[in-house]
Image (cartoon, grey):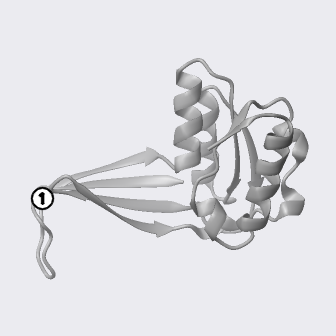
Amino acid sequence: MLDVVVHAESAPQPGTDVGGSIRFRAGGSAANTARSFAALGGHASLICVAGQDSLAGRLLASVRAAGVVVHAVRAKGRTPRLLALIEQGERSFITDRSVADELPPGRLKLAWLARVDGVHIPAYSLLNCSLPQAAPAAALAVRRAGGTLS
């Protein structure tokens, strides 16, 4: 997921311009968690769906460069995007999940979960489209192997 992070200098009002900063970052809570775990010395993997556009390739490469093993199912469509509007210490998200929710259980390979000690499943993965079937399958496989689930 591409995160577009906007820090507003003041509260935006309809029909006006507001100063601030705009940053583009590799994001997505699952990828962020995997990158953080790898940075702490852990062995991390990311299971995700990515679009077939060039942005997806760059984002996947950045996760791999952080030391994360990536298992990406490529789907026809746009790479997911999230706009994070930060103002007065609070954040609001506008999400364009696009292909992020298109991981049918049949595309989840249980071999990707072999020898894992834990799995992190973001809340979106339990709420949207085909992911509510795929995420529990992953969780069950990890729990059966004695792993930790968050």
Residue to which mark 1 is pinned = 19
Quick check: 22 left or right of 112?
Answer: left
Viewport quadrant of the C terminus: top right
Residue displayed at 15% across by 56% down? 88
| Image position, residue 83 (x, y; %) | 38, 61
User: Compared with residue 96, is residue 123 higher up or lower down, i.e. above or below?
Assistant: above
Does residue 132 appear in the picture of this structure?
yes
| Residue under the point 57% across and 59% down | 123
Viewer-proximal residue among 111 and 116: 116
Instruction: State the image quarter where residue 6 is shown.
Output: bottom left
- Quadrant location of residue 105? bottom right
Residue at horizontal 66 percent and vertical 68 percent from the top? 77
Q: Secondary structure at mark 1?
A: loop
Q: Residue at x 80, y 41 (%)?
A: 142
Percent of width and height locating residue 141: 85, 45
x and y percent of residue 108 in the render?
A: 84, 53
Residue 150 left/right relative to 14: right
Q: Note whether residue 62 is visible.
A: no
